[in-house]
């Protein structure tokens, strides 16, 4: 099955062609990404109006380039997939409308893909994973732990109660006078800095559950910076390093809890001898035991732009190993927004007969836990 995928939900205009074989393995035939970062950099963030207009201007050429790279015509496709949400609505409409036009003209089925499902299923293409696995999705707009149980079947174990992780990196960078996007800029400055110089908080660390809270950390960073302003270059590096060290600790702690929750769901009998009626308490009792228990073995996948961060990857590699889990991190190009993940999610849905009608709506909000139609597949 060969599927064209179109992604226009944020600041990348992307198109890709992917083949999914009957055995569930896949192959990328074309992968074209046009980043708008330079269009938005002057504004310190993505400007929705500029993004939508840039998608209109670029998408024709990006789709044509992908089809050329794949060396097929529209007639050779089995379906056309596009991000139908969640995202910046102007951009989503541009990509989805283009996909509908191609589907109509070439008489192919349309697959309206949830952008988050694209991130969630990528590891099945890159690493041939079977369900279920645990996913940490961390991008500019999303921060969540999901149990991925099948195509269309997701259980959210935790999310952020304020800022997304990528958003926190972007805001921290802005505050320190570093360029957009903030993640790579903070990571580079942190490499030169002293992460112990400023004692920043680790909100929710040690608390039950797998939720995140990042706004208190952002405020603490601002106060620390104001206290020593004006900032010398060394101060910026030390603040960036201290911020990243806090984020790394937070992600580690939350991942430990999420792995416990995931393992517990897979082995409910393990909770019975954990000795407390209170679920939070029970989790606390269980965690050290699950750590030693090979039954907790599972897989943690990281996805989203923040997954490119080497310090976070290294910490998660250690933390997963301690819990008998394996960390899977797709290549950075496939962690950030791209067309391959949309084409692949489209192919996975097509394989289950899950296609959409030409009146499928574009959605600004579309939680993964609302997909409904999906089914488990090995
Ligand atoms: O997934 P993505 O490309 O776009 C969406 O938000 O959907 O993620 C972009 C986010 C930005 O907030 C950016 O600052 C962050 O990912 N990011 C990073 C790194 N590279 C990108 N955050 C931390 N460290 C990085 N190396
Ligand atoms: Zn994304």
Image (cartoon, rainbow, N blue to C red):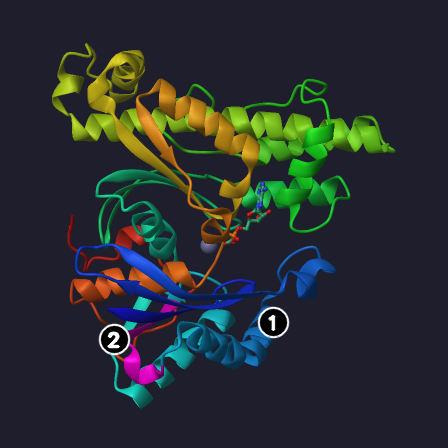
- Label 1 Cα neighbours within 10 Å, binned few <14 / some 14-19 / many ≥20: few
Between 156 and 3, the residue placed more toward the observer is: 3
The percent position of residue 231, horizontal first and vertical second, equals 84, 33
Query: What residue appears at the point 53 percent right and 79 percent down from the top-left corner?
Result: 61
The percent position of residue 238, horizontal first and vertical second, equals 74, 26
Query: What residue appears at the point 40 percent right and 72 percent down from the top-left corner?
Result: 70
The yes-or-no answer for disc 1 within 8 Å of ligand 1 is no
Q: Give the quarter of the image for residue 17.
A: bottom left
**Residue hosting label 2:** 78
Question: Does label 2 or label 1 sit earlier along the sequence?
Answer: 1
Q: Tell me the element at label 2.
A: loop
- Compared with residue 154, is residue 210 higher up or lower down, i.e. above or below? above
Question: Furthest-top residue in view?
Answer: 275
Query: What residue appears at the point 21 percent right and 12 percent down from the top-left corner?
Result: 276
Query: What residue appears at the point 55 percent right and 74 percent down from the top-left corner?
Result: 55
Residue 66 as seen in the image, left or right of residue 215: left
**Residue hosting label 1:** 49
User: Magenta residues?
Assistant: 73-83
């Amino acid at each position: 099955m060969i599927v064209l995928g179109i992604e226009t939900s944020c600041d990348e205009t992307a198109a890709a062609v992917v083949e999914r074989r009957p055995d569930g393995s896949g192959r990328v035939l074309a992968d074209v990404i046009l980043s708008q970062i330079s269009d938005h950099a002057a504004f310190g963030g993505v400007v929705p109006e500029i993004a939508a207009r840039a998608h209109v201007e670029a998408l024709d050429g990006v789709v044509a380039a992908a089809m050329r790279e794949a060396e097929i015509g529209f007639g050779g496709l089995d379906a056309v997939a596009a991000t139908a949400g969640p995202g910046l609505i102007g951009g989503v409409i541009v990509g989805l409308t283009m996909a509908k036009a191609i589907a109509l003209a070439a008489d192919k089925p349309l697959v309206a893909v949830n952008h988050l499902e694209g991130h969630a299923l990528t590891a099945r293409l890159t690493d041939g994973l079977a369900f279920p696995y645990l996913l940490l999705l961390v991008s500019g707009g999303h921060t969540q732990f999901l149990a991925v149980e099948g195509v269309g079947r997701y259980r959210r174990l935790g999310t952020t109660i304020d800022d997304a992780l990528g958003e926190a990196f972007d805001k921290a960078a802005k505050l320190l006078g570093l360029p957009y996007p903030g993640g790579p800029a903070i990571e580079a400055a942190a490499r030169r800095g002293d992460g112990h110089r400023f004692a920043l908080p680790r909100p929710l660390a040690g608390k039950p559950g797998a939720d995140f809270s990042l706004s208190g950390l952002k405020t603490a960073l601002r106060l620390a910076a104001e206290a020593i302003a004006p900032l010398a270059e060394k101060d910026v590096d030390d603040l960036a390093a201290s911020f990243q060290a806090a984020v790394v600790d937070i992600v580690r702690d939350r991942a430990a809890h999420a792995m416990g929750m995931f393992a517990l769901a897979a082995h409910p009998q393990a909770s019975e001898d954990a000795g407390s009626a209170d679920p939070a308490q029970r989790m606390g009792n269980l965690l050290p035991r699950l750590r030693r228990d090979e039954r907790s073995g599972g897989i943690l996948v990281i996805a989203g732009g923040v997954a490119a961060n080497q310090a976070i990857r290294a910490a998660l590699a250690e933390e997963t190993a301690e819990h008998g889990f394996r960390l899977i991190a797709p290549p950075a190009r496939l962690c950030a927004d791209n067309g391959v993940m949309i084409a692949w999610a489209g192919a996975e849905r097509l394989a289950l007969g899950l296609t959409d009608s030409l009146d499928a709506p574009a959605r600004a909000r579309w939680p993964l836990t609302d997909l409904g139609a999906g089914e488990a597949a090995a």
